């Protein structure tokens, strides 16, 4: 029975000595000193209570028990090399399962298209997408990559900035033209994270020194951008839409303040790895490139 990790090391060294034909050649192949290799063999034979090799200054020969034991040690080395090769091959081509989470604002417009392009090239990638505007627990939910708006305060995960986007205050063109109310009193469709009383600070697109503020009360709250967009498109009222999603609905929606814009929102990628698996790093790079194209 294997009782300690050093015994596996001794078995591996023993197999290399048999295959190399001598302790000196095995030591050279293993980048060890001859004394270290000899010590491994000595301890192995002592702990097993059996002589495995008969050695002279010029030759070595397996004993009967040594021959039987070598068969198992050879299988151990072959299995270890196969495991090593398997992992290296997986790191040469992106493949395998990957779980990615992102908010509604980014999933359909950025994440899915970016990963979809990769799958055409590397069909061994098997993604699972989780759409959530909440900050999910990466370890608890077995998530490999999280794309979030805003930096995370959780120091347990690695994070880096990968892009940015703006929210745009929009309305159905018919609603905006026909509403008789001042902007502050229009029906406001809020996302759940905005709260009840909402403050916006806009900056002129032409003159950065010129600004405009807007304070409104939420008349309706939704838990996702798709729900907000659906209500705005129906002419219910005004609300924020990510510019990334606005491009998909521009024929029905117009900017409420076309000469002004809100501040940029920063996008971060989070993951729980010290060293990124190839499939994760490849997907992350593709998502980052997709974001750069939409800037």
Image: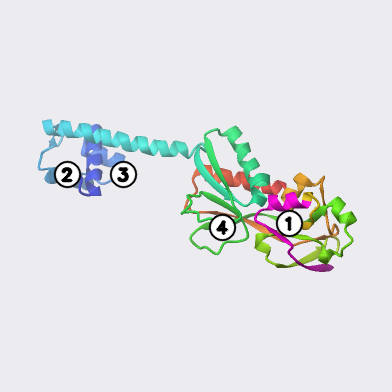
Number of the front mark, 3 or 2: 2
Q: What element does badge 3 sit on? A: loop
Q: Position of residue 215 (x, y in %)?
A: 78, 69
| Residues tagged 3 and 4 counted as in contact (Cβ below 8 A) | no
Q: Report the disc number at residue 31.
A: 3
Q: CA distance from mark 2 to mark 4?
A: 53 Å
**Magenta highlight range:** 209-232
Sequence-wise, the earlier of marks 1 and 2 is: 2
Residue occupied by mark 2: 44
Q: Closer to the camera, 97 or 279?
A: 97
215 in magenta: yes
Q: CA distance from mark 1 to mark 2?
A: 67 Å
Sequence-wise, the earlier of marks 2 and 4 is: 2
Q: Closer to the camera, 291 or 85?
A: 291
Sequence-wise, the earlier of marks 3 and 2 is: 3
Quarter occupied by the N terminus: top left
Please tell me which residue is depicted at 82% across the width and 68% down the height of the picture. 211
Q: Is residue 291 above or below residue 123?
A: below
Q: CA distance from mark 3 to mark 1?
A: 57 Å
Q: Is residue 77 above or below residue 5?
A: above
Q: What element does badge 4 sit on? A: loop
Q: Position of residue 270 (x, y in %)?
A: 55, 54
Sequence-wise, the earlier of marks 3 and 4 is: 3
Residue occupied by mark 1: 166
Q: From the viewer's perspective, is 65 left or right of 185?
A: left
| Residues tagged 3 and 2 counted as in contact (Cβ below 8 A) | no
Q: Within 10 angstroms of label 3, few (less than 14), some, or many (20 or more) residues?
A: few
Q: What element does badge 1 sit on? A: strand
């Amino acid at each position: 029975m294997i009782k300690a990790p050093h015994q596996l090391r001794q078995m591996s060294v023993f197999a290399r000595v048999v295959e190399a034909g001598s302790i000196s050649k095995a030591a050279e192949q293993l980048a060890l000193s001859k004394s270290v290799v000899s010590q491994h063999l000595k301890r192995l034979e002592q702990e097993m209570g059996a002589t495995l090799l008969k050695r002279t200054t010029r030759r070595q020969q397996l004993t009967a028990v040594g021959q039987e034991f070598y068969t198992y040690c050879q299988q151990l080395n072959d299995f270890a090399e196969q495991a090593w090769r398997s992992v290296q091959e997986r790191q040469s081509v992106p493949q395998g399962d990957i779980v990615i989470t992102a908010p509604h604002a980014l999933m359909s417009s950025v994440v899915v298209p970016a990963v979809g392009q990769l799958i055409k090239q590397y069909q061994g990638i098997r993604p699972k997408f989780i759409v959530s505007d909440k900050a999910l627990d990466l370890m608890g939910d077995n998530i490999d990559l999280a794309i979030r708006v805003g930096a995370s305060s959780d120091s347990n995960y690695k994070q880096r900035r990968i892009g940015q986007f703006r929210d745009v205050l929009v309305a159905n063109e018919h609603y905006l033209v026909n509403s008789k109310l001042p902007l502050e009193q229009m029906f406001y469709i809020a996302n759940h994270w905005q709260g009840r009383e909402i403050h916006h600070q806009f900056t002129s697109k032409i003159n950065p020194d010129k600004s405009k503020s807007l304070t409104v009360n939420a008349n309706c709250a939704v838990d996702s951008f798709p729900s907000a967009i659906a209500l705005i498109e129906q002419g219910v009222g005004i609300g924020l839409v990510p510019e990334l999603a606005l491009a998909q609905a521009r024929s029905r929606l117009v900017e409420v303040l076309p000469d002004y814009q809100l501040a940029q929102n920063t996008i971060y990628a989070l993951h729980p790895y010290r060293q990124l698996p190839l499939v994760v790093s490849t997907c992350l790079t593709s998502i980052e490139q997709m974001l750069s194209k939409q800037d």
